[in-house]
Image (cartoon, rainbow, N blue to C red):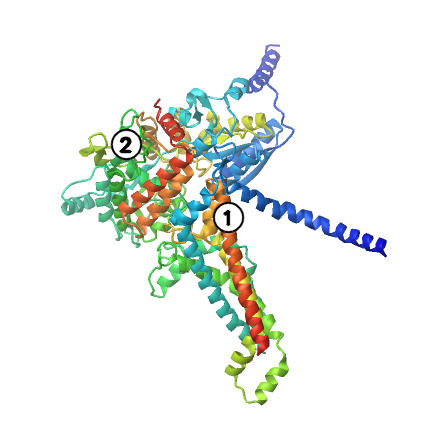
Amino acid sequence: MAGTFLSNKGVKWAFLLPALAYLMLMAILPLVWTLSLSFTQWDANTMPKPKWVGLGNFEYFLLKDKRFAHDLRFTAMYVGISVSAELAIGLVLASLLSQKFKGKNFFRVVYLIPMACPPIAVAFLWRMMLHPDIGVINSILQAVGIGKVKWTTSPKVAPFTLIMVDVWEWTPFMFLALLAAFQALPEELYQAASVDGANGFHMFTRLTLPLITPVIVTISLIRAIDAFKLFELTFGITGGGPGSSTESLSYYVYLIGMKWFKLGRGSAVSWIFLVILLVFAMLLVSRFKSRELTVKAR
Amino acid sequence: MVKKLFVVFAIVLCFLVAANLFGQVKVNLKVPITVLVTDPHIQVVDTWKPLWEAQTGGKINIVLVPYATVEEKMWIEFRTKAGSFDIACIPGTWKGDVMGGGHVEDLGPYITKFGYPGWDDVMPGAKVLVTWAGKTMALPYDGDNHMTYYRKDALENKEYQAQFKEKFGYMYKLPIANWDEVRDIAEFFNDWDWDNDGETEYGVAFIAQQNTQAMWSYLDVVAQYTTMAGKASNFASNIFFDADSMDPLCKSPGWVEAMKMIQELTKFAPPGLLGYGYSELRQAFVSGNSAIGFDWGDIGIQEQQTVTYGSKVKGLLGYGPLPGAKKYYDRQTKKWVEKQHQVNFLDFGGWMWIIPKAAKQKDAAYQFGTYITNPEHSLLDVCGIHGYTGANPWRWSHFKTIDAWVRGGWGRESVTNYLKAISDILQDPYAVTDLMIPGASEYYNSVDTHLNGVLSGILDPEEGCQLIFDDWKRITEERGKDQQKKYYRASLGLK
């Protein structure tokens, strides 16, 4: 028996080890390495070796660097608005396309196209279309009598331009997940509610929404974490501008680490970024759990 | 018999020339070389690749990356030493980090070993660009400076000139003498159809889009208000730092005045100016949308391309140096000096070819580098025969071979004026050189970001300059003030 157990255990480990080794090599080691770098100054283009600075980098970002604070605020605003809008539009679309009507499959496919495009290609495509002077969108707006919009060159408009493109690209994800959730809802519940005299609105708010809440929270969490890493749209459409009005935290990390090659400071800001993301994710997950319990209690 | 002897002699001569080209030193061409290049220089590599391969038996792999990512690609190679490319075309403004950091080959031994075609033909500015601490660390390839372009059909129109004089009470000079004149001309020609093509034209256009080299548009103005031309010293032909204290000059009255001027100019520019990177500017300007433009030599090349770039201004452009200013701030006396003057500024400095220390095929890379930058081949790349390549004239011979330019699509008079404008700038011994110390990328990101803040109305000029100053001070201190000062003084030619 013991021999069988050992051999079973051995087999398990034999299967697990490659994956563990891969994880160690590709995820854990870089994390540890960047953590150790975050306590150093290493301007890698001119300094041959890192120099120990203790908590200096963290102190810089958390207490002194206004750009970091600004970028964090912008990113949070971007995540909040874009994910909410995507959820709302995705909900409406999923609700509509879960009904039975002719040609719904066509629309289902069409709505998925933006999500299938590579984000960087999306960014450059929109950059061309949104160009204030030669972009097709302003040409159309002018043709119908609306003036030119400073899509990417006004600090007041540019943040919302990025949000608009994000919503265009990622609403299909919300739509797809919610559509699946809608189709999995038990028909009998609705029949029973109908017999009890519930109207469409009541059924949606009292039945549909509570039932799909776990899906909503999960996809919101996934999208929020993804949106928090905003990079391609900033890089491709606005370059962080005008000024720093659309500079996301990821873009700032990129500048520090990949453009200026300040690897110590880049590692520190990456770690701060990671911790913020973890806290954010934990908060959402805990809310999800409490909401799930509430729903079950009902 | 004599005929046979002559043939034999000719064959032997051919072999000798071929052998002599590389000092009779054998180069291993069995392994392909990898060339890292960005658009539009790919045009040059694509042109010469098949010829070089056919002539030498070598093989070239091309890694094409967009301008925005060439820097990270290069630094990843420098840090990892993976040998991912053997030769790369990079901007001269990075030389402080690239050469100062010791990441590229000293090409002196290669020049000794293999020779270099026409070194005496290289203009002094281009030689300075590829030199670091007295060593040749790159192959010259491009002569870069901003210059003024103006529409002759507008600015030389007698009727418009009379109207201008009536409105402003004076007559501007051509080429335009100073930024005040630019402002007035831009206002005059802004927002009406002065070339009667049925479309509205604007006064002035320049690169203003963030993250696409807009800081050089601003530095064109800074150079005029911050210093006077002279043998480089702390107070002459110096615009970035106090060379003694290494304090940034970014909030000096000269910088602030320049910021106010460039902000003012945006009022007389196309509405989408802040979306003008270098590509958009060139495209817009040659399509005829503005009276004045500022750019490297590239607009001149695209001006000739009526099909590829849809130029509507062929033969209609005038060329000149950067406008000067009616005054400059003298930091010695801490007073404005009211005097018409002009300073040339070698923005960007030009592209150059470097061979990384970790390159695997250095000899072959050097051979390819000299092949594309030799006098005959480089002429075809700069004069328009190969279209728009992003390379501007940098050899003495480029300025003398007018016929080649005419073959490249230029009018004889146009190209003569164009080359004179560039040659005057490149030969100016007092031209301000670009910022070429370690951290240049970070320093310039700060200028770019806050300039854009000012142009888009988020910041006022004083705030913008103060923020740049704060950033520059911090960057300098973080990188080591003494070290940076040493590099900076060296870049000015000071001890």
The C terminus of chain B - image quarter: top left
Query: Can residue B468 be seen here?
Result: yes
Task: Using the rendered view, name the quadrant where residue B411 is placed.
Answer: top left
Q: Residue furthest top?
A: B1
Q: Which mark is residue A270?
A: 1
- Determine whether the residue tagged by mark 2 lies in a helix, strand or loop: loop
Q: Are marks 2 and 1 in contact (CB under 8 Å)?
A: no
Distance from the alpha carbon under mark 2 to that under mark 1: 43 Å
Please, what is the three-letter code of the amino acid marked with disc 2? Val
Task: Using the rendered view, name the quadrant where residue B12 is placed.
Answer: top right
Residue depicted at x 32% and y 29%: B243
Q: Chain of mark 1?
A: A
Percent of width and height locating residue B100: 46, 29
Percent of width and height locating residue A253: 47, 47
Q: Chain of mark 2?
A: B
Is B451 on the left or on the right of A276, as rendered?
left
Is A156 on the left or on the right of A290, as rendered?
left
Few, some or many residues within 10 Å of mark 2 (<14, 14–19, 20+): many
- Above or below for B20 versus B343: above
Please, what is the three-letter code of the amino acid marked with disc 1? Ser
Percent of width and height locating residue B340: 20, 33
Residue denoted by label 2: B343
Residue depicted at x 39% and y 57%: A158
Residue nearest the viewer, comparing B147 with B192:
B147
Is B184 on the left or on the right of A1, as rendered?
left
- Above or below for B427 versus B390: above
Is B53 on the left or on the right of B352, as rendered?
right
